[in-house]
Image (cartoon, helix red, strand yellow):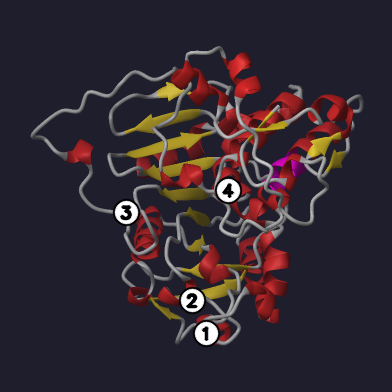
Amino acid sequence: MRHWLSYCVDNDPFCSRQTSDVLPRRLLSLGAKYSTRVFLIETRDINNSVRKQGEKNLQYACLSYRWGVSNEEILRTTADNIEAHMDKDRGIVLQQLPQTIIDTVRVCRELGIEYLWVDSLCIIQPRPYTSLDQDREAHEDWVREGSTMDNAYGNSYLTIYAEAAVNCKAGFLGPQDYGKNSWQRISPARAPNAGPDSTVLDGRGWCLQERIMPTRKLRFLGTEMSWECNCRMFCECGHTREVDIDGILSVGRLLMRLGDGERFSHHETWQEVVEDYSWRSVSDPEDNKLMGVAGVARLLLKSTEEDPNGEDEYCAGLWRSDLVDALVWMAVDKRPKQAELEHGMPEWMARRHLMPRTRLASGTPTWSWASINGGIAF
């Protein structure tokens, strides 16, 4: 993994571009390699030090993972303990954290990354046995930090994906299948631009932005480690290839190239994002679903602003320039591709035969796809 990261830093200039100047308010300072404690620090304090050292960007890692347990089962930052968490002497005892976070700290230290962003520790969480609406400090911090979470991932030096961990207590370091010499695995062929197989993170709503926004991705899949960046992919199984500029996870790659004169239609890209997102689970079905793709929308809107002939307006999950076509979305109970396989019908026909879902979410116009809880298709 050191080689993958250093090779990308030295050879892939597209991967060093940040999506914005917005940084998360807090980061974990990881300290020395064998330190038994970490502590929270505000990024404004780190930025002052970074500028004094003449460095251009603050280098920190992000973690994408699945909580999978109740809030009360894990140590997290609340309004009651944030002062202690930010104290350099007291801080946070590493062994009190969930194993997935401990493993991430170890990976970061091995790679020489000093700072880490983890939502459960860097955003104030509700006090035990209270909800976000019942905890004023947590709610205010979530409104501020949650609305810019896409920037936390988009501006990260590296994002680590704990895809082998079924929950935050499971961890992801340990023996990998590809590390066993007693047998060899024969993998089924995939499309040339297909990444590693789907994992538990691929079903979570928030994880879609966490997959799209970062420029460098280190994935722990259980079978192996893999690397994805704007320019190439690596994996332990030995298949190395240049990244094909195609597919839903290439949104960031396309946008990073806007400064070099490339243009693309954001309508088709957006529809692919929305269809994928609509099938993912959201922990609270009454949440505003639009927040989960707000970062992608901001990037696409920025792309139209940079093109004098392509300025557009974002309207509750749809684009003004594509409003007539985009309003013709439908609620479906199976992905069209899945129906095609199960019933032997073409995809276009499958779209017309799927049973709709009509369960509404609150706070969103009913003409928007985000007004229902369930899969949609355009």
How many residues crowd mark 1 within 10 Å: few (<14), some (14–19), many (20+)? some
Q: Please name the residue shown 50% across and 48% down the image.
A: 158
Under mark 2, the amino acid is: Phe
Sequence order check, earlier mark of 1 and 2: 2
Under mark 4, the amino acid is: Gly
- The residue wearing badge 2 is 39
Q: Please name the residue shown 90% across and 32% down the image.
A: 311
- The residue wearing badge 3 is 172
Q: In the rendered structure, are the residues bearing label 1 and label 2 in contact, judged by CB atoms less than 8 Å apart?
A: yes
Marks 3, 4: nearer the viewer? 4
Can you say which quadrant of the picture contains the N terminus?
top left
Instruction: Please provide percent x and percent y for residue 307.
Output: 86, 28
Q: Is residue 120 above or below residue 220?
A: below
Q: CA distance from mark 3 to mark 2?
A: 22 Å
Sequence order check, earlier mark of 3 and 4: 3
| Relative to 271, 245 lies left or right | left
- The residue wearing badge 1 is 87
Q: In the rendered structure, are the residues bearing label 4 and label 2 in contact, judged by CB atoms less than 8 Å apart?
A: no
Marks 3, 2: nearer the viewer? 3
Any part of residue 20 in sight? no
Q: CA distance from mark 3 to mark 1?
A: 29 Å
Any part of residue 46 in sight? yes
Under mark 1, the amino acid is: Asp
Q: CA distance from mark 4 to mark 2?
A: 29 Å
Instruction: Please provide percent x and percent y for residue 131.
Output: 61, 75
- Residue segment shown in magenta: 293-299
- The residue wearing badge 4 is 205
Between 45 and 174, the residue placed more toward the observer is 174
Sequence order check, earlier mark of 3 and 1: 1
Between 173 and 90, the residue placed more toward the observer is 173
Query: Helix or strand or loop: what does disc 3 sit on?
Result: loop
